[in-house]
Image: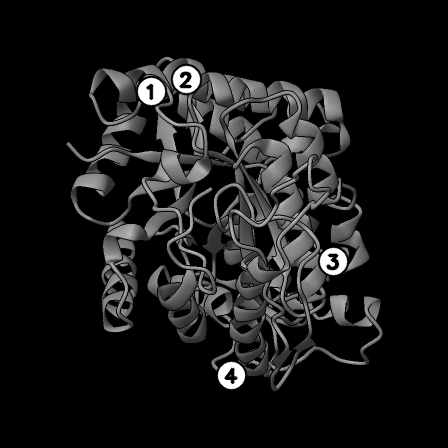
């Protein structure tokens, strides 16, 4: 029987814009180490594959009336937080987002290698190209790099980082006290990379990561994003939506991977899903309705503006979106999903803002049985290998999922009762990659 994989999307701690206003939430949870420690330990008790931390390199590019209502403005830097959380957990994977557009490849290689060693082999790199145009100005650029160029750079960036991880053979560090030789220079390889976007000499000044390479995660849904995912990703954070759309995305990326010479079974596609669970379907619907009632109009307009890449307040709120929108370097796939939904459901701008104000993606609301039925249906239809779960409230929503949904999934035999390995690669059933420069060596 196929097994479901579960990640927990925890930055922001809830994707719903009103999460921090709910009575069951701690409003400072994004920036509260004690609360986040409780959450990750609860998730580890629930045998989750990984704790997934996104990142923003600028405050969200929305009007101040919406931004002042957003709980995303303050949060921890991912590596700092995950290094701390590695010390209070033993098995759960630790996924950090890092940008190929604004970070240096050497820094990224070193940070992820460090996190993998610190955690005993639980690190993963979520590769992003950064869609927020305001981030460019935080890194000395007058305007954002074009979308296509960001993806070209990302592929070269990936090649450099993985090459740096392979700087040393597994047996390079002999640490022979008798001879006084700490490491064998013949077991080290300089990268000496000179490419279109990057120039990196190497070697990396840290031993090869415990997992060989930290797990590679990717979340792009545009054509360029899908191709990058098919070529390099081992876990994909897919956009949620109707199951038929999920199935089409699943089949497309896996077929691209096969054409690229990869085994499609070694790519785990996990849509994001906001899960609201209670003892009964009615109680869950009531809980979600309470949360949605706390969404302010400004937050809805802000969410819509981010998705479109333009200020939605300029449009007539009681008419459909214009047929033609200004060009933007915002996420192409995110904008298209919103446009498709507006047309499919015949929504006005106001209605669309309300829909996006809470959360506009895949939502599963119901009893443990209802939630498990939905997840199992996606798994058995070949539309997903698991889910990146998002929680309506924190920490209450985390506790509800672990206490109510996980036992139901375990009872059905589609989710583990305990970890069988110690590394994230083992949780996901992924092989440890060979060193491209020193093949055949062992740890």
**Precedes in sequence: disc 3 or disc 4:** 3
Q: What secondary structure is marked by label 1?
A: loop
Residue 268, percent across and down? 33, 48
Quadrant of res 51: top right
- Picture coordinates of residue 8 (x, y %)? 50, 34
Q: Is residue 403 above or below residue 95?
A: above
Residue 367 is labelled as: 1
Residue identified by numbered label 3? 57
Q: Which residue is mark 4?
A: 324
Closer mark to the observer between disc 3 and disc 4: 3
The percent coordinates of residue 307 (x first, y second) are 57, 63
- CA gap, disc 2 to disc 1? 5 Å
Query: Which of 439/79 is in front?
Result: 439
Q: Is residue 180 left or right of residue 188?
A: right
Q: Nearer the viewer, mark 2 or mark 3?
A: 3
Q: Residue at coordinates 26% horizontally, 34% vertically from top-left?
A: 374
- Kindly identify which numbered label has been placed on residue 278: 2
* Residue mark closest to the camera, 3 vs 1: 3
Of mark 1 and mark 4, the one earlier in the sequence is 4
Q: Quadrant of the N terminus?
A: top left
Q: Are marks 3 and 4 in contact (CB under 8 Å)?
A: no
Q: Is residue 351 above or below residue 396?
A: below
Q: Position of residue 156 (x, y in %)?
A: 55, 75
Can you see residue 291? yes
- Could you tell me if the residues under marks 2 and 1 are in contact, i.e. CB atoms within 8 Å? yes
For image coordinates 76% across by 27% down, the residue present is 32
| Gap in angstroms between the C-alphas marked 2 and 3 | 35 Å
Q: Nearer the viewer, mark 1 or mark 4?
A: 1
**Disc 3 to disc 4, how far (Cα)?**
29 Å
Left/right of residue 386 with respect to residue 24 in the rendered view: left
Answer with mark 2 or mark 3, whichever residue precedes in sequence. Answer: 3
């Amino acid at each position: 029987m196929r097994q479901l994989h579960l990640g927990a999307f925890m930055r922001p701690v809830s994707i719903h814009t009103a999460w921090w206003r709910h009575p069951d939430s701690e409003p400072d949870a994004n920036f509260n180490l004690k609360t986040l420690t409780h959450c990750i330990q609860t998730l580890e008790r629930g045998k989750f594959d990984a704790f997934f931390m996104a990142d923003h390199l600028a405050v969200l590019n929305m009007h101040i009336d919406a931004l002042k209502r957003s709980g995303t403005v303050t949060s921890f830097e991912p590596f700092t937080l995950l290094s701390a959380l590695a010390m209070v957990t033993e098995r759960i994977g630790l996924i950090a987002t890092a940008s190929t557009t604004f970070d240096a490849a050497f820094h990224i290689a070193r940070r992820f290698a460090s996190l993998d060693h610190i955690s005993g082999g639980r690190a993963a790199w979520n590769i992003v190209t950064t869609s927020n145009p305001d981030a460019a100005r935080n890194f000395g650029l007058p305007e954002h790099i074009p979308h296509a160029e960001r993806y070209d750079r990302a592929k070269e960036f990936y090649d450099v980082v993985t090459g740096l991880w392979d700087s040393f053979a597994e047996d390079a560090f002999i640490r022979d006290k008798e001879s006084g030789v700490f490491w064998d220079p013949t077991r080290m390889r300089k990268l000496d990379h000179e490419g279109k976007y990057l120039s990196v000499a190497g070697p990396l000044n840290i031993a090869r990561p415990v997992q060989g390479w930290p797990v590679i995660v990717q979340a792009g849904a545009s054509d360029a994003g899908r191709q990058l995912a098919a070529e390099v990703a081992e876990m994909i954070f897919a956009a949620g939506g109707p199951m038929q759309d999920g199935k089409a995305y699943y089949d497309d990326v896996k077929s691209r991977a096969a054409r690229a010479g990869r085994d499609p079974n070694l790519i785990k596609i996990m849509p994001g899903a906001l899960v609201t669970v209670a003892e009964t379907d009615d109680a869950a619907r009531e809980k979600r309705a309470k949360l949605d009632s706390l969404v302010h109009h400004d937050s809805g307009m802000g969410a819509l503006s981010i998705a479109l890449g333009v200020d939605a307040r300029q449009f007539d709120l009681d008419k459909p979106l214009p047929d033609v929108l200004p060009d933007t370097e915002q996420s192409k796939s995110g904008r298209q999903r919103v446009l498709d939904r507006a047309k499919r459901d015949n929504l006005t701008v106001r209605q669309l803002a309300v829909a996006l104000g809470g959360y506009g993606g895949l939502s599963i609301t119901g009893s443990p049985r209802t939630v498990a039925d939905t997840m199992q249906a996606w798994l058995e239809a070949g539309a997903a290998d698991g889910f990146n779960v998002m929680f309506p409230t924190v920490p209450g929503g985390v506790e509800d999922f672990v206490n109510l949904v996980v036992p139901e999934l375990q009872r059905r035999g589609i989710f583990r009762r305990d970890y069988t390995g110690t590394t994230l690669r083992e949780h996901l059933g992924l092989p440890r990659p060979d060193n491209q420069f020193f093949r055949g060596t062992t740890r």
